[in-house]
Amino acid sequence: MALVSMRQLLDEAAKGGYGVGAFNVNNMEQIQAIMEAARETASPVIIQASRGARSYTNDTFLWHLMQAAVELYPEIPVSLHLDHGNEPATCISAIELGFTSVMMDGSLEADGKTPASFEYNVAVTKEVVEYAHARGVTVEGELGTLGGIEDGHGSGEVHLTDPDQAVEFVEATGIDALAVAIGTSHGAYKFSKEPDGEVLKMDLIKEIHRRLPDTHLVMHGSSSVPQELVAEVNKYGGSLKPAWGVPMREIQLGIQHGVRKINVDTDSRLAITGAIRKVFVESPEKFDPRDYLKPARAAMQALVASKMRDFGQAGHADDYASLSLAEMNDRYATAAV
Ligand code: G3H
Ligand code: 13P
Ligand code: ZN
């Protein structure tokens, strides 16, 4: 089927009471791993690309890889989303390329680092909503800022989302999905120990959902940083420091309270790196890239499939299967631009 709008995926997820993983990609193997995991678990899925991913792949390569994914996995509803658009022009170029969803991250200024004012955030987000909705494209906004600066996103300061402002923000902008700041950050080093309610504010999600029951909530920085993946990287020569992420049970609690999109990048990076390091250490004579990219792809597939089951999206690709391809295209495809 054609790429579907993310709004459609999230509306279906809300009806079914499950979450949908949004997995970051930078290359063919990651796209293949996600699509294979989606097929294995019959899951609808969101594939997302950051600005960095777009410049690494070159938009044209990325677009054609996604077209191949859609063609080869016709039974999987898939949405292509821009992660952390830094200004309206970045979102507009993604929409022109064919993305079916964009994030306008106006919580930070266009440099992606300086915390922005509420007024600035409303203005740039509203501008993108007007452009995107006219073309059937979904928009995610963000209110509050995540911690974590090591991956190049964020100010390093955490500003938790204010529930009152969240209501005002959604009303003023018309966004489809709201990314909330509840104490998480991007990257492997989110918490110095297993997080409790003092540092990971799940109560805030409950409160925002109570006030905005019809807005799909998004959790960024949702990698769980599984201890076994960290140990695998370190066993084969890596030097990751002790690291804690967001426990799956907290994500599942969020899903019970309106979280519909769950962003994961770091865990995929860990799975890939561990698998590649293992080959390098155990078989130093090998130099065909397929010898280490195949296990890397398989490791990411296993990770993503397991998350799809835990988020509850597994089995839900079939919800769309009663429609013919033509009907699905009519119903879900975004307007041509
Ligand atoms: O938002 C953070 C994602 O992990 C993307 O990271 O900008 O290094 O591609 P990136
Ligand atoms: P992680 O670094 O926790 O995987 O978060 C990714 C993310 O939020 C992308 O927007
Ligand atoms: Zn993010």
Image (spheres, rainbow, N blue to C red):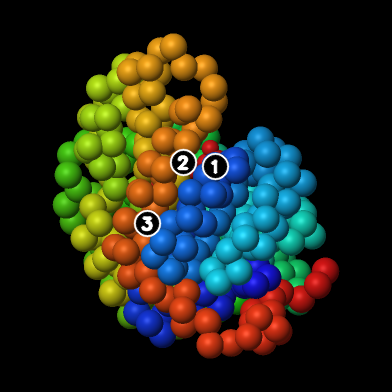
Alpha-carbon span between mark 1 and mark 3? 15 Å
Q: Residue at x 23, y 30 (%)?
A: 231
As shown in the figure, which amino acid type bears the numbered disc 3? Ala
Judged left or right of residue 86, residue 288 is left
Disc 1 residue crowd, few under 14, some 14–19, many 20+, Cα 10 Å:
some
Mark 2 or mark 1: whose residue is earlier in sequence: 1
Disc 2 residue crowd, few under 14, some 14–19, many 20+, Cα 10 Å:
many
Mark 3 or mark 2: whose residue is earlier in sequence: 2
Query: What kind of element bears circle 3?
Result: helix
Q: Is residue 273 visible?
A: yes
Q: Residue at x 44, y 31 (%)?
A: 150
- Label 3 C-beta lies within 8 Å of the nearest ligand 2 atom: no
Question: Which quadrant of the rendered structure holds the N terminus?
Answer: bottom right
The residue carrying mark 3 is 305
Q: Is residue 39 above or below residue 329?
A: above
Query: What kind of element bears circle 1?
Result: helix
| Direction top: furthest residue | 285
Total numbered labels: 3
Query: What kind of element bears circle 2?
Result: helix
The location of residue 298, given as percent across then percent down, is: 41, 43
The location of residue 310, given as percent across then percent down, is: 29, 63
